Amino acid sequence: MRVALVSPAWKMENPYPPLGLAYIGAVLEEHGHTVKIFDLTLEQGAEERTGEVVRFSPDIIGISAMSHSYESALRIAGSLKTRTGASIVLGGPHPTIMPQEALGKEFVDFVVIGEGEETFLRICENFQSKSFHGVDGLCYKEYGKAVIQQKKNFINDLDVLPFPARHLLKLEKYKLEDDYGNRMATIISSRGCPYGCTYCYKGLFGRTYRQRSPENIIEEIKYCIDKFHYSSFYFVDDLFTLNPKRVEQLTAAMRREKLDIRWQCLARVNSATPQMFKQMRASGCYKVHFGIESGSQSVLNKVKKGITLDQVRWAVMYCRDAGIKTKGYFMLGMPGDTVDTMQDTLDFAGELGLDDAMFSITTPFPGTELWENIDKSRIGPISSAFYYLDASGSDVNIFYNLSQAADADIMEMARKARQITDAVKLKTFCERRFGKRLGFLAWQLSRVQVLKK
């Protein structure tokens, strides 16, 4: 089969390669299918350039859709169905949540629920026989009616999966760099999350935490070094540090293999230990990203984050003592937020001594607990649900205000948050340009108003 895998465009250029599509592509290639990946997020206005997909003459077109890119995905799907006659498969978070709605589109033939490697392979294997009954997580049409087959099984042994088919991606076009200006590869080392944060969607990979073995991860790192000449890596799974024993084994293997790499990861503060960060630093880790979200304990409790402010303080301090940089993620306008609690968040972000910070507007998405508790009559098109506070300083239209503060108050806090973000980024720049000691001095001087001007 000839299979085109498409990542639809959305409001901003995406520096992250679509590893989910690359995993599906790798599995399909392993079974003899011809695959091409078309990432339309690389450049704005890419919907008009779907001619490349048409010229590929695919039998099947798989399109991945987040909630905020769903409408774009539908436009692309309708156009490509008309121009190619290929079978259209939708997957990703939004179709997983709303398969009936997706199959209601006349140009959509299949919906894949949850992780897609095995299910998409079964589509290709059974394409000629048209026998799709009982395929786990596959939804399709039969006699004009939708057949919804919910996901029952996830891939427990992630080591059986081939490495993502990065050779199908235009890697040189992704603008993902580390703090030293080196191009950076992304790696997923685990799937699933047992935590119950009300703003987070768990349906794609489930609630059961599944992890790749240290040996398998090391093999992928070596492959990326040898094949694509990467020396910097970013573990983008949400729970990289959930199992300290695996982290210990992985970092020991990195040192044993004498891998000359820099790497960073996402981590939860409640799994942080001084020993773990020291081991990570010794193996090349230079930066850890923490989802902190709020500086108000009552707000953290309301969104079921499962962490304390003291755990945040300790985690950042452990990293600093180990020589690891820290980045914090924060959200404004959370349930229970007031002007005072949002100011607490800004103050907390400032006091932590982070090396980088990122703020966003809290946004309810389908499939989350937040979404279940909102008045759906008050929302606009889901494509307008955009929450990043970009560097340009332009305001974000608040999709749905979940807080006890007015929209104008949230946006005023967002403007203040940008000042904090600029300050911590300037500190990182100064230290990178002049070294840690002189850079810190330059950063301190830059905060003096006269010198800043």
Image (cartoon, rainbow, N blue to C red):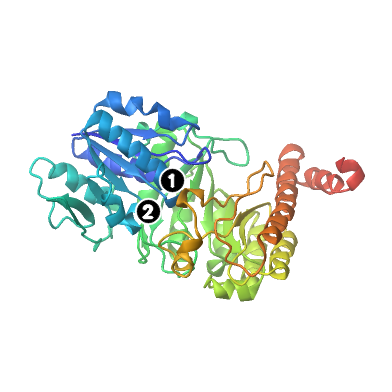
Q: Is residue 189 left or right of residue 58?
A: right
- Check disc 2 and report the residue beneath it: 94
Q: Quadrant of the C terminus?
A: top right
Q: Quadrant of the N terminus?
A: top left
- At which x and y percent is residue 267? 53, 60
Q: Say above or below: 6 vs 422.
A: above
Going 49% across and 31% down the picture, which residue do you hit? 43
Q: Quadrant of residue 176?
A: top right
Q: Quadrant of residue 37?
A: top left
Q: Is residue 272 left or right of residue 10?
A: right
Q: Say above or below: 12 vs 329.
A: above
- At which x and y percent is residue 186? 46, 44
Q: Nearer the viewer, residue 360 or 287?
A: 360
- Check disc 1 and report the residue beneath it: 69
Neighbours of disc 2 within 10 Å: few (<14), some (14-19), many (20+): many
CB under 8 Å between callouts 1 and 2?
Answer: yes
Q: Is residue 208 left or right of residue 312?
A: left
Numbered disc 1: secondary structure: helix
- At which x and y percent is residue 60? 23, 37
